Image (cartoon, grey):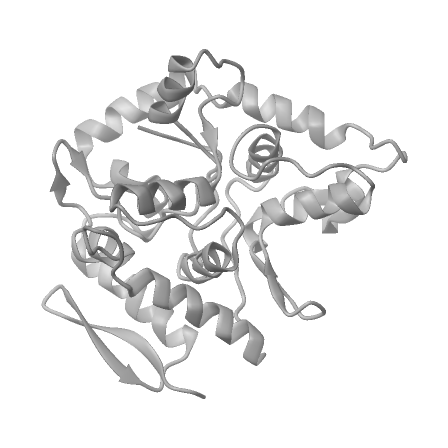
Amino acid sequence: MKKTVILILALGFGILQTTHASPKDDLKIFQDFFKKRFPKVNFGDFSDGVYALDKDRREAWKDWMDFEPPFTDSIELGKKLFNKKFKNGKSYASCFKNGGIGIRQHYPIFDKKSGKVVTLESAINQCRVSNKEKPYPWKTGKLPAISSYMAFTSRGKKIKITVSNDPRSLAIYERGKRHFYTKRGQLNFACADCHLHNSGNRIRAELLSPALGQVTHFPVWRRKWANAASAKGKSGPTHGLGTLHRRYSGCNKNIRAKPYKAQSDEYTALEYFQTYLNNGLKINGPGLRQ
């Protein structure tokens, strides 16, 4: 196997070292880091992000979730759209295993035929195109509503991503890994700087979320996105909802780096890498975040 860069952990700090490593090695090192960094957090609770780290935030978040979660209408819209027939009489169910129900935990998937990684959102749009329908915009609107519904049908199922020995699969995984650990932007930050080394630390009034558990709750409804939409006079069941790639773009902007396009090879590789390292956590999307 070609040389890869893996994270060796010592005294809570990441040290990059070149060695022969497999994705399986990375998975153990990555998850062990967070278990040691936050020994009081149950493994399954990492799916709750920063709300697993802070008691007061968790209580406020649970009250918010239990009272009237704002993504409920998005799930209902997604279900309606998912079951709506295309002009040719077929539906989304015809494009997915198990009719598209309870399958979120398997995405993204490496497709041997094309040699590419397929995210759930790209699979939804490919389903539309193959049935002579126009694709939806990638980051907001009806597409995340549909993936929200599909995620909802997978709640409680554990993420199970496979990185095969196919050189193309490994190359995409390694590309996502390089992105995660590479510094970029005017602030010269990497994903790992905030969400690995400084996870649980404060940045202004906010806590930096652990990378472990970040992918479980997407698509996500964010108050920040909803407020921005309202300021532009937009409203509706999806106005605060967004995909994981929308969040990636926002992170790049925060560090003053030029974001990649949603569903680009770069962000798809990052999603593949990051989701694999979340294997074993349960899907709890759609989620609710600040």
134 or 128, which lies in front? 134
> Looking at the image, which residue is at 18% across and 39% down?
207
Q: Residue farthest to the right? A: 88
Indicate the quadrant containing the N terminus: top left, top right, bottom left or bottom right. bottom left
Q: Residue farthest to the top? A: 233
Q: Position of residue 165 (x, y in %)?
A: 55, 80
> Looking at the image, which residue is at 64% across and 70% down?
115
Q: Position of residue 206 (x, y in %)?
A: 18, 34
Indicate the quadrant containing the C terminus: top left, top right, bottom left or bottom right. top left
Q: How many marks?
A: 0
Please, is residue 227 above or below residue 78 in the view? above
> Looking at the image, which residue is at 53% across and 15% down?
236
> Looking at the image, which residue is at 39% across and 44% down?
249
Which image quadrant is residue 106 in? bottom right
67 or 166, which lies in front? 166
34 or 253, which lies in front? 253
Please, is residue 142 above or below residue 48 in the view? above
Which image quadrant is residue 134 in? top right
Left-right relation of 24 to 107? left
Question: Is residue 165 visible to the viewer in this orientation of the structure?
Answer: no
Q: Position of residue 35 (x, y in %)?
A: 24, 58
Question: Is residue 285 visible to the viewer in this orientation of the structure?
Answer: yes
Q: Position of residue 264 (x, y in %)?
A: 52, 54
